[in-house]
């Protein structure tokens, strides 16, 4: 087990190096730092001196890979690649283009993100599984048929409409919750209710359809036929056999996204003005703060890989047949 | 003068390959069998027809030209710098005139009060009348009667047209060919019914647009219905062009990795795991941000804003394609790995067939179902993604008509008092119809092509 985990972590290193090289190429090679600086300062009438000071303030004035003016190891360390890219491996995100400490911001902002993402995930899971079980119980009837069509219809609505519609209906017309904003502590709840509800409703269509197909796959297996032929009632078959076995793919599907919950939801957070990592990313994209975007790409990748490793481990915990080698 | 934008050419290629594929299907009995499952299903027929209707609109909107502008002497002329499409010439009643500002659907006046001069001394605050539509009733003074009569006439027209189409096209071409599958398909009453309803809905909307703004006007007085129809091309292009860009990568690399194996497999696997590990929104965002910087600093030679916007749409499709091939590639790798060990592949290997011909003759046909299912499934997700990306300002150019841009603008309109709802509603309606039928179609296609799908639950 421990051998396996160590192996997986070692396997993650080349992937992270790949991601690092890719972001480095995208952000520094495709466009040179001078060009980025020119964009930030406004394209026209920018003097060379302005560009140089802008780059100096942010540390983009060094050569990309090899610094000729330094000696020994320093000639590799005083480069953009070392300072802006390799340091990410130590989770040293540096300073954003507007001069704020990125690591501090991330630490501050991940909690509001989590406060939305966690309840949305678990409430959604509960509701989706219930609906899916309901469909499966009434399979081959009209209830299931029209239910699935309704799910497809719900899936076909863009998330933007759920948010705009929900905000308009509940906050603006009915005045039940504030339209947007955030407060720390228990006061946060009144700001969180609406985003959570909307995320849950948005997920119902695809979620319950997906769980329904998992249950249906399970229901055709031989052990279910055996259970039925030995005289168990339909609900006993459904809850004791089908449900328990279908929980394995459901659980592992949840585990893989658990670490990514820190990243928050881009659209929901920015619509509701919640100071989470999602709105942080959106703001960075809109103000073209590439230092933040770069850090978020790296962070997202790390969290995704952690999710994959956790999934493998959780498989061994819930399914005794799986052995990790 | 006909002009070709970059995306136009790619869209023609898509249409052409679609036709080639249809010909291939008709000549291959077992694939025709699978597809006929799709067209025996009512949902399948309906969604296929709605989708092809949307495709047709997008195609009409992809034939671009520049109009001649005659000089004063009526003989010499220059070409206008404005690029129009064939669809525009059809939709002239919708866009040739614009109003001053917002007006609600079917309304005869603007949405906000203005000070109007009644005479030299008296000024009055009232809703100004619309300049071009809403007050010029054709049949009755009363709006409701007028709308009703227009509706009836449009319906009667579409009924005649449908019968005409049914008699001329369907009957004649079908009796010539003695192909039962196809004639069963075209004899289907449900098919006729859905064609009829699409024709009548579009005719009703078209006839009404001569007299009313059916979905109101936007901030600068442009017909919202026109904007929504023009957005169809953007949505369809993003859904299809992206797949066309990604398919060669995914198919080639997937088969290569699965069938050849060894170090090739390791490298390809490494590439797609790396790309797949980056959260897709962030990857797309970084790629597009960098593209924006590149385009800002290297002003490429564009003749006009249309080509610039078109270039951005094309790059958006490229980037979306390059970030979304990983899933399909992984599926294809697994499948070709399985196929490598299958007996008939082993047999052809012992007969001395080259690797290339084994891949083309035996592996490719047996993974096509995965490709088709993925292409159809991805379509709706891509259309939805466009809206979200445009909201974050990393989508299509702000001057391009797209549902994403409409929603983006509608955010401010929703906070106005009284609320301007029709832009959002129009974008919602059109997007919902396209995505819904794409989803329904993909369900039916998956049922038909996926060997594991449970057909008996239908």
Image (spheres, rainbow, N blue to C red):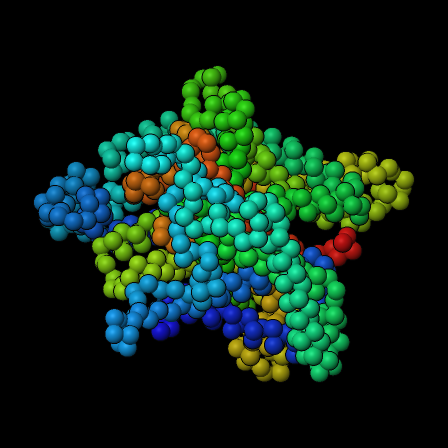
- Residue B447 versus residue B258: which sits nearer the camera? B447
Please state the horizontal and vertical placement of residue B420, each as a whole percent of the image: 46, 37
Residue at x 42% of width, y 25% of height: A181
| Residue at the front extreme of this rendering | B120
User: Measured along the vertical axis of the image, is residue A324 above or below residue B318?
Assistant: above
Q: Quadrant of the N terminus of chain A?
A: top right
Residue B41 position within the rendered picture, expressed as x and y whole percent measured from the top left: 73, 60
Q: Residue at x 30, y 59 (%)?
A: B305
- Residue B287 visible in the displayed image: no
Q: Residue at x 26, y 31 (%)?
A: A100
Image-quadrant location for residue A180: top left
Image vertical order of residue B116 relative to residue B433, above or below: above
Rendered location of residue A266, percent (x, y): 44, 38
Name above or below for residue B368 compared with residue B215. below
User: As drawn, is B306 to the left or to the right of B425?
Assistant: left
x, y percent for residue B445? 65, 60
Answer left or right for B355 relative to A138. Answer: left
Q: Nearer the viewer, residue B301 or B342?
A: B301
Q: Is residue A324 left or right of residue B67?
A: right
* Residue A228 seen from this side: yes
In the image, what residue occupies the spot 60% across and 30% down?
A123
- Considering depth in this image, is B372 or A17 the residue closer to the camera? B372
Taking depth in this image into account, of B293 and B172 the one nearest to the observer is B172
| Number of numbered discs overlaid on the protein picture | 0
């Amino acid at each position: 087990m421990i051998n396996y985990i160590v192996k997986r972590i070692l396997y993650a290193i080349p992937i992270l190096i790949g991601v690092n090289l890719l972001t480095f190429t995208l952000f520094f090679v495709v466009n040179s730092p001078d060009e980025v600086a020119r964009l930030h300062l406004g394209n026209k009438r920018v003097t060379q001196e302005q560009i140089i000071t802008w780059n100096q303030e942010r540390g983009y004035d060094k050569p990309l890979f090899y610094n000729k003016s330094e000696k020994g190891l320093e000639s590799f360390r005083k480069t953009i690649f070392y300072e802006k890219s390799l340091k990410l491996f130590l989770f040293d995100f540096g300073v954003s283009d507007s001069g704020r400490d990125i690591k501090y911001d991330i630490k501050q902002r991940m909690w509001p993100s989590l406060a939305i993402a966690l309840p949305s995930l678990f409430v959604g899971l509960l509701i989706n599984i219930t609906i899916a079980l309901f469909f499966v119980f009434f399979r081959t009837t009209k209830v299931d048929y029209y239910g699935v069509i309704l799910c497809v219809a719900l899936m076909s609505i863009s998330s933007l409409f759920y948010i705009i519609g929900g905000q308009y209906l509940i906050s603006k017309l009915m005045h039940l919750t504030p339209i947007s904003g955030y407060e720390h502590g228990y006061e946060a709840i009144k700001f969180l209710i609406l985003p959570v509800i909307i995320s849950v409703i948005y997920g119902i269509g695809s979620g319950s359809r997906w769980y329904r197909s998992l249950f249906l796959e399970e229901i055709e297996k031989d052990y279910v036929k055996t259970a039925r032929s030995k005289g168990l009632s339909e609900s006993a078959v459904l809850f004791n056999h089908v449900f328990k076995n279908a929980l394995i793919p459901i659980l592992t599907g949840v585990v893989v996204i658990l670490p990514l919950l820190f990243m928050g939801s881009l659209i929901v957070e920015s619509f509701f003005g919640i100071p989470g990592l999602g709105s942080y990313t959106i703001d960075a994209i809109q103000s073209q703060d590439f230092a933040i975007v770069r850090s978020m790409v790296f962070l997202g990748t790390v969290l995704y890989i952690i999710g994959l490793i956790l999934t493998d481990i959780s498989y061994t915990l819930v399914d005794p047949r799986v052995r990790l080698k | 003068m006909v002009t070709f934008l970059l995306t136009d050419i790619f869209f023609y290629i898509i249409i052409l390959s679609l036709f080639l594929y249809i010909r291939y299907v008709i000549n291959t009995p077992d694939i025709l069998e699978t597809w006929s499952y799709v067209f025996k299903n009512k949902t399948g027929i309906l969604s296929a027809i709605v989708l092809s209707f949307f495709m047709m609109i997008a195609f009409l909107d992809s034939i671009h030209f520049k109009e001649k502008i005659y000089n004063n002497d009526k003989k010499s002329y220059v070409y206008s710098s404005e690029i129009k499409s064939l669809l525009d010439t059809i939709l002239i009643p919708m866009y040739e005139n614009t109003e001053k500002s917002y007006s609600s659907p079917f309304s005869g006046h603007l949405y906000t009060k203005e000070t109007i001069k009644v005479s030299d001394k008296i000024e009055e605050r009232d809703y100004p009348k619309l300049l071009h539509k809403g007050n010029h009733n054709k049949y009755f003074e009363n709006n409701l009667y007028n709308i009703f009569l227009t509706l009836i006439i449009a319906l009667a027209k579409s009924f005649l047209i449908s019968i005409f189409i049914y008699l001329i096209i369907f009957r004649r071409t079908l009796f010539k060919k003695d192909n039962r599958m196809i004639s069963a398909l075209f004899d289907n009453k449900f098919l006729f019914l859905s064609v009829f309803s699409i024709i009548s809905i579009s005719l009703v909307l078209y006839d009404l647009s001569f007299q009313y703004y059916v979905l109101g006007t936007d901030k600068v007085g442009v017909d919202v219905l026109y904007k929504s129809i023009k957005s169809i091309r953007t949505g369809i292009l993003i859904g299809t062009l992206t797949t066309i860009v990604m398919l060669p990568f995914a198919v080639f690399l997937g088969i290569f990795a699965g069938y050849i194996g060894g170090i090739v497999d390791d490298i390809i696997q490494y590439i797609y795991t790396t790309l797949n590990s980056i959260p897709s929104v962030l990857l797309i965002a970084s790629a597009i941000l960098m593209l924006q910087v590149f385009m800002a600093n290297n002003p490429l030679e564009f003749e006009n804003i249309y080509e610039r916007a078109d270039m951005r749409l094309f790059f958006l499709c490229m980037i979306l394609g390059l970030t979304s091939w990983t899933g399909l590639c992984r599926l294809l790798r697994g499948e070709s790995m399985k196929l490598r060990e299958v007996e008939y592949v082993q047999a052809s290997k012992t007969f001395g067939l080259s690797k290339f011909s084994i891949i083309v003759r035996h592996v490719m046909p047996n993974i096509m179902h995965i490709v088709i299912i993925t292409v159809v499934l991805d379509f709706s997700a891509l259309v939805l993604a466009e809206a979200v990306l445009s909201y974050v300002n990393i989508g299509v150019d702000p001057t391009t008509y797209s549902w994403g841009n409409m929603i983006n603008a509608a955010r401010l309109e929703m906070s106005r008092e009284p609320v301007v709802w029709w832009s959002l509603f129009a974008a919602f309606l059109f997007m919902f119809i396209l995505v819904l039928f794409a989803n329904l179609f993909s369900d039916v296609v998956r049922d038909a092509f996926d060997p594991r799908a449970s057909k008996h639950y239908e």
